[in-house]
Every structure is written in structure tokens, then in C-alpha cells.
Image (tube, grey):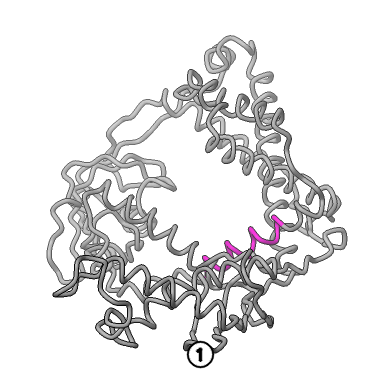
Amino acid sequence: MPTPLSVTTEQLPKSQVGMTIEVPAETVDATYERVLNRLTSRSKLEGFRPGRAPRALVEARIGPAAMREEVVETMVPEVIRQALDEKSINPIDSPDVEVVELERGRPARLKATVSVMPEVTLGDAASLQVAAPSVEVTDEMLERRLADVREPLAEITPVDREAREGDVAVIDVEVEADDGSVVPSESRQAMEAELKEGVLLPELQSAIIGAKVGDTRSTTVKFPDDYSEPKLAGKNGTIKATLQGVKEKVLPPLDDALAKQLSGGKYETVEAYRNATREQLDESAKALAQMAREQAIVKALVEASAVDMPDALVEREIASHLDSLERSLQRQGLRLDRYLEYLGKTPEQWIADERPEAEDHVRRDLVLDEFGRREHIEPSDDEVTAYIEQEVAKDDELRGQVEELKRSPNTRRYFASRLRRVRVLERLAEIAGAGTPAQT
């Protein structure tokens, strides 16, 4: 039975606990004896058989500073564990320990600082006022969808005119880095690109529209930090495009025959097909509106709550993001240090830039976890099993592994966490009420 310690605690900022620990003199002396016995048993001094040298001689040879260090390394971990147990403190990182006093025959005094899970002062979910987005599918949205489904059947015909939105442009592309050098990996010859949103960079599309065959247009763009070409990632580059040809896309008319073809025989008339398509759009719009409201409710609850954020959790989140980034770069044959060089950032600058997002992520998780705890949301084993089966059924590659996945402890923990979060969001949306219609 360990000798009781004298432990006083104080609450520190950022969800830390300070401990002042007094270790009884008998514990200090006993530790010195244990350390000296261990060192003596391993000693090899000239004139004595291994482990048979006098203890006083061994101690003199080691010296007081080294002896004290050995005692610290032996005693401190045991004392810290005992102090944490006595005060029922669950640390989330390794304590920072300072040995204030330590000598034979006297009580030792230690100071320790440890991070713990923070207390979350949860906002009142029932009082959250979140406007529900309006849900409306316009005729324009319907026509756009009907055009999209006919697009694979469109006839593409060369035309002798300027490039217009919706055309297919045939272009030669050359990209220059900010130092003026051409980036060969980004150059293209006779590349066909449709002039519509999401195909080309918006700046390049704007430059090409209105151009005629033979025209060269250029634009300067800022490439994203995670761009795959290191010479351009996070930097400005100049894109030069020479228009070599213009092709017009002509959609087939939507008649009964085409409606039947597009629906796989499910609908016989254009009217029936149009109505079904509008219903699909309505369902998608409602799902997007629900997701938007859900995100708004979470944001409102986080803003209404208070969390004394521990640095340890934020640093763990940053480390996880850094590990994911490094694995992603390795798959592309890149090194992290070289990637940061291309970004023009030191590791410290990258961490500083990532910190706000990491803090937001940790704060959101802590608030939602606390809400789930107070609402007693914890899926049963049977519910987790059913959820695994439901989710795996959506993935052709995993479908044959369902029994193995259900038996895996790691898999069960992962899906239990996902299901818990789903239930938390559902309950939060329920408590927050239906909201008020958005003003238009």
C-alpha cells in the first residue's frame, strides 16, 4: 500500500490542473535505497566482483547529481500516478513536472501541471433561433436538369464563330510559374474543354469566352495551397490559352420517345418525366435545406456554449491533420518539407495557420459530445450492428466483408461514433424546433 501523499490542486486556465505534491521523507529515503541497491547490483568496479562493491563506494563513484537524477526518474512517475489516482484526475496528456525539493531525510516537493478534458457550459438548445432555408425548385432549375440529362446525347458540331458559354473549346494551354518559367506538366495541346461552370478555372473560362480561332488569351490565377503541382501550389501563375477551334453542342429535343429512353421505360410521356424530375429536385432541395439548417443549428449551439479549450486537444488535432497531409503527399511522391518550401511556409507558420480551424473542430466536437452525454445518447450493440450492415450495403467493395467488419472492435468503435453523432444531430434538430422561414 503506497504511503499517502499530500496533494493540493488548483484550477488553471485552458482546462489545466496544477498540483503541489509533498512526498513523505520515508518514501524519498526508500526510493534512494532502491536506486542504490539497483545500481550496486549492476556495478563493475576494479577490485570487486560484479555487483559486490560496497554501496558507499558505488554512491561516491556515481556522484550526488547523477544519484538524484536516478531517484527522480524512479520516483516521479510513481508519485504522479498516485497523486492523479488520489484526486481522481484523468489527464489527456503527459504532466509537466518540476521537482522543487528532493534530498534524503526530508519530504520531497513536486509541482505538476496536467491538462484534463474541459468542462463544457452548454448553451440552451431549445432556445436556439435558426431560420430554416426556403425550399423552392424553379422552372429554370428544372430546365437545367433536363438539359443535363440530355447532354450525353448532344451532337457536337464545329462552328465558325466566337466561343460562347456552353461550347466545347479546343485550346492549347501553357502555364507559367510566378518566376516566368513554363511548367511542362501543366501544358496541353488541342485540349477540349466545355465552357461551363466547374470545368475550367473561372478566370480561364472568362478569358476564352468571346475569343475567336487563333486568339491567345491569358489570365493570372492564384493556385490553391494543396494544388498537385508543387511549383504552383499556393502561388500565382499565368495561364495562356490559344483557341484552335469551337464546337457547338446541340441537345436533342425532349419528346415522348426520348423521355421513355431517359427513364428506362418508366415514363411514357414528356409530362410524366418532367413531373418526376421535378419531384426528384424537390427531394434534393429538401435534403440540402435540412443539411444547411443542421449546420446552422450546430454553429449556433457552439456559439452559445463556453469551452475552456485545452492546448493538448488542439495540438492533437493539428498533428492528426499533419499526418493526413503527409500521407497524401507521399502518395503523390512528394515530401512534406519540400511541399512547405513550395508554399513558402515554415512548419511553425503552417501550424499557426492551421490552429484556428483545429480549435473550431475541437470546440464543435466537445460541444456535440457534451450534448449527447446530457441527452443520454449511446447506441446499443444491436443498433451499431444494424448500422454497420446498413452502411456497408451501400459499398460494393465492403459488402462481402460485413461479418468480418461486425466482429472488428476498431470497426465497431468507428461506426458507433458515427451513429452517435447522427443521433446527436437528429436530437439537436428536434429540440431546436422547426425554425422560421427564411426571408426572401
Q: Is residue 182 left or right of residue 202?
A: left
Does residue 363 appear to the left or right of 49 in the view shown?
Answer: right
Q: Position of residue 212 (x, y in %)?
A: 25, 50
Please give the residue where the numbered disc 1 appears in the rendered image.
Answer: 101
Q: Please identify the dominant SS of the magenta region.
A: helix
Provide residue 61's location: percent of width, then percent of height.
24, 83
Q: Is residue 188 magenta?
A: no
In what quadrant of the picture does the N terminus appear?
bottom right
Q: Nearer the viewer, residue 274 or 364?
A: 364
**Eyeballing the image, is 320 above or below 412?**
below
Q: What amino acid is labelled 1 in the image?
A: Glu
The answer to whether residue 3 is above or below residue 339 is: below
Residues 50 and 431: in front is: 50
* Other-residue count near label 1 (Cα within 10 Å), few / some / many at <14 / 14–19 / ≥20: few
Residue placed at 21% from the left, 62% from the top? 231
Residue at x 29%, y 37% (from the top left corner): 159
Magenta segment boundaries in residue numbering:
356-369
Quarter of the image where one finds residue 419: top right
Q: Quadrant of residue 40?
A: bottom left
Q: Residue at x 66, y 44 (%)?
A: 288
| 435 or 152, nearer to the observer | 435
Residue 128: x and y, percent?
Answer: 82, 62
